[in-house]
Image (cartoon, rainbow, N blue to C red):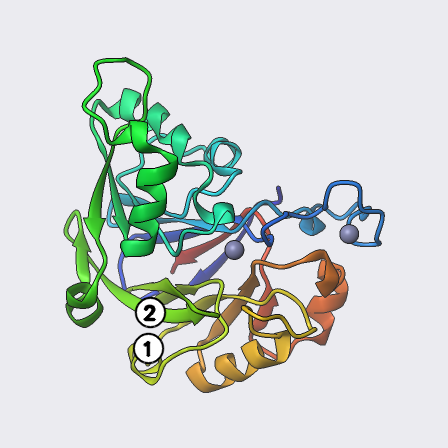
Amino acid sequence: MVNVIKQYDFGYPLMKVTLLGTGTSQGVPVIGCKCVVCISNDPKDSRLRSSIFIEVNGVNVAVDTGPDFRTQMLNAGVIKLDAILYTHEHKDHVAGMDDVRAFNQMEGRVMEVWANKGVEIALMRDFHYAFEDSMIGGLPKVKINKLGKYQEENGFVVEGVPWTLLPVMHDKMEVCGFRVGDFAYITDVNFIPEDTFKKLVGVKVLVISALRKQRHPSHFTLNEVLQVVERVKPEAAFLTHLSHYIGKHKDLESELPEGVFVGFDGLVLENV
Ligand SMILES: [Zn+2]
Ligand SMILES: [Zn+2]
């Protein structure tokens, strides 16, 4: 993991965003793959599953808990986590939830989680023991706050900090993007509704998924992502959820238009 800090005006005081993971569902390198990306020595070509950590006004929020959640919390040195926001229920975004118990134990409280219906069903199925009134120590404890129509229209508040819900589509699955201040995070998307484009007006920094250049049934191609960036016009856009097919970090960065950058694990975006 490389630590590089870039500064932007997020329109919100005391704000810091860390890219914890920028890889697609299998991560990069892919197990057993000998392609140029997977054997690259550049640390920026090593990508854990996609997730971000946002510190805003003293409130610490993780977006998603993929299979690398534990490693990501250790890498970023997170010792306080107030809430988890979930984008959608695919395994590369939820599989690591079990490890919230470290925070349950450290902070002596239930983890506040924000999730839409699909995520709620998946979490209660896969991690049923986290919702049971059990006296057995060591189990994770989670409380779900719903992300539905009301939150879509009115936003939601996490420990005093207002967030905007940005619904997008991932083939037939509804995915939650999130905006806080003038920062927005959208991953796993192949369609953005007009109402969500309206909520993106004024965003200064956009982190958005761009799997690869070739067509995929549930992800935008790189070109389609660049068209979204062109329309939203942030000061800076960072690509995440990248597959080994996208090529090496260095090569990809040299192909991108001004203001668009390749995200990498450990990148920190801070308020000026
Ligand atoms: Zn994904
Ligand atoms: Zn590969």
| Residue 161 occupies quadrant | bottom left
Question: Where's residue 103, x and y in %?
Answer: 32, 27
Could you tell which of marks 1 and 2 lies nearer the N-terminus? 2
* Residue count near mark 1 (Cα–Cα under 10 Å), binned few <14, some 14–19, many ≥20: some
Type of amino acid at the residue the image marks with label 2 = Pro
**Point 74% across, 62% down: residue:** 245
Q: Quadrant of the N terminus?
A: top right
Residue at the front extreme of this rendering: 125
Question: Where's residue 55, x and y in %?
Answer: 33, 48
Q: Quadrant of the C terminus?
A: bottom left
Residue at the top extreme of this rendering: 136
Residue 108 left/right relative to 240: left
Q: Circle 1 is placed at which residue position?
A: 196
In front: 105, or 250?
A: 105
> Callout 1: helix, strand or loop?
helix
Q: Circle 2 is placed at which residue position?
A: 167
Observer able to see residue 182: no
Residue 260's label in the rendered image is none
| Residue 181 occupies quadrant | bottom left
In front: 63, or 151?
A: 151
Question: Where's residue 239, x and y in %?
Answer: 56, 65
Marks 2 and 1: in contact by CB < 8 Å?
yes
In front: 250, or 221?
A: 221
| Residue 233 occupies quadrant | bottom left
The alpha-carbon separation of the residues under discs 1 and 2 comes to 6 Å
Does mark 1's beta carbon lie closer than 8 Å to ligand 1? no
**Is 86 placed above or below 226 here?**
above
**Point 45% across, 35% down: residue:** 73
**Is 140 placed above or below 45 here?**
above
Type of amino acid at the residue the image marks with label 1 = Thr
Total marks placed: 2
**Point 79% across, 41% down: residue:** 32
